[in-house]
Amino acid sequence: MSTLVCFHAHPDDEVFGTGGVMRSASDAGHRVVLVTATDGALGEVPDGLLDEGETLVQRRQAEVAASAAVLGVHRVVNLGYADSGMAGTEGNTAPGAFATVDVEEAAATLAEVLREESATVLTVYDPNGGYGHPDHVQVHHVGTRAGALAGVPYVYEATMNRDHMRMLMEANPAWNEQPDGAEAGQTGQSGPRPDVEAFGLPESELTTAVDVTAVLDAKRAAMQVHESQIGDFGPFLAMERDVLAVVFGTEWFRRVTPPAAVGAARETALPL
């Protein structure tokens, strides 16, 4: 049995890029550990969703626990840092915000978890955090350093295939339409529409493409339990399964430890 540790910024981030590999690894008999850096306190929440006296943090912790159960996760760890909010907001520099913490300090904390679990594979984010969110960028720095400190044999950057995203946008013009003052994945927040060219990595840099269509129903079910983040997941929950498979049926990675050999064939699975 091997151990897969997926390091993410907030509750709900686990679903998009690693939900499939987590469930597949668990189904194959491997141990799966989910580590989140923050509590997601600055996320959007639909009016009227929270129960009387319930905080968003409490709801998001319950949601990530439910998502983890759907994805076959054996242990969920939260490092306890404050959510830094979207790029350019006041939360970016708030005391205790994950984006501001000392990388060595946070990496040492994560490394302890990696050692406890004898992690075989660790997933982090690419250097831009997928799309530039300060907490996601910090996951890259902290996670990469922690992997080195703990001597994890394999470290991968979970990311998006920029070329695939561009193709989808070009093939589906309606996907480029959204209400004024809305930002992709952050319905209701003002700001310019993100440039697809700033998302993920070009396909030429991706070393690993994992087909997760066999566990796509679990991935969708994990999306559904994150009710507080319906602005992120809503459009995808309404998709037909074959369309969802085109969008989320492959999870993309770049292997950084050990580096992939130049010209090597693209991997189709994580080394578990």
Image (cartoon, rainbow, N blue to C red):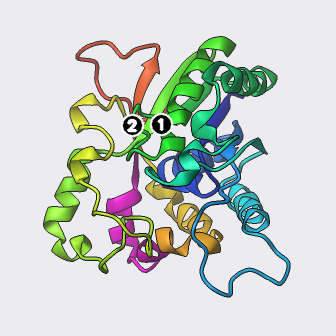
Compared to residue 8, the image places residue 103 above or below, namely above
From the viewer's perspective, tell me whether residue 83 is left or right of residue 79: left
Q: Residues within 10 Å of mark 2 (few under 14, many from 20)?
A: many
Magenta span: predominant SS is helix
The residues bearing labels 2 and 1 have C-alpha atoms spaced at a distance of: 5 Å
Where is residue 68? Give x, y as percent.
70, 55
The residue where tag 2 is placed is 128
Discs 2, 1 touching: Cβ within 8 Å: yes
- Residue type at mark 1 is Val
Look at 41% across and 31% down and name the residue there: 127
Q: Which mark is residue 137?
A: 1
Residue 78 placement: quadrant: top right
Q: Count neighbours of disc 1 (C-alpha within 10 A) and say few if under 14, some if 14 to 19, many if 20 or more.
A: many
Q: Residue at x 44, y 40 (%)?
A: 129
| Lateral position of residue 57 relative to residue 243, left or right | right
Q: Is residue 246 magenta?
A: yes
Q: Kindly tell me whether residue 85 is visible in this rendering.
A: no
Q: Viewer-proximal residue, 194 or 223? A: 194
**In the figure, residue 204 lies in which quadrant?**
top left
Indicate the quadrant containing the N terminus: top left, top right, bottom left or bottom right. Answer: top right
Specify start and end residues of the magenta stretch as a single range: 234-251
Position in image of residue 86 (x %, y %):
48, 54
Circle nearer the N terminus (2, 1): 2
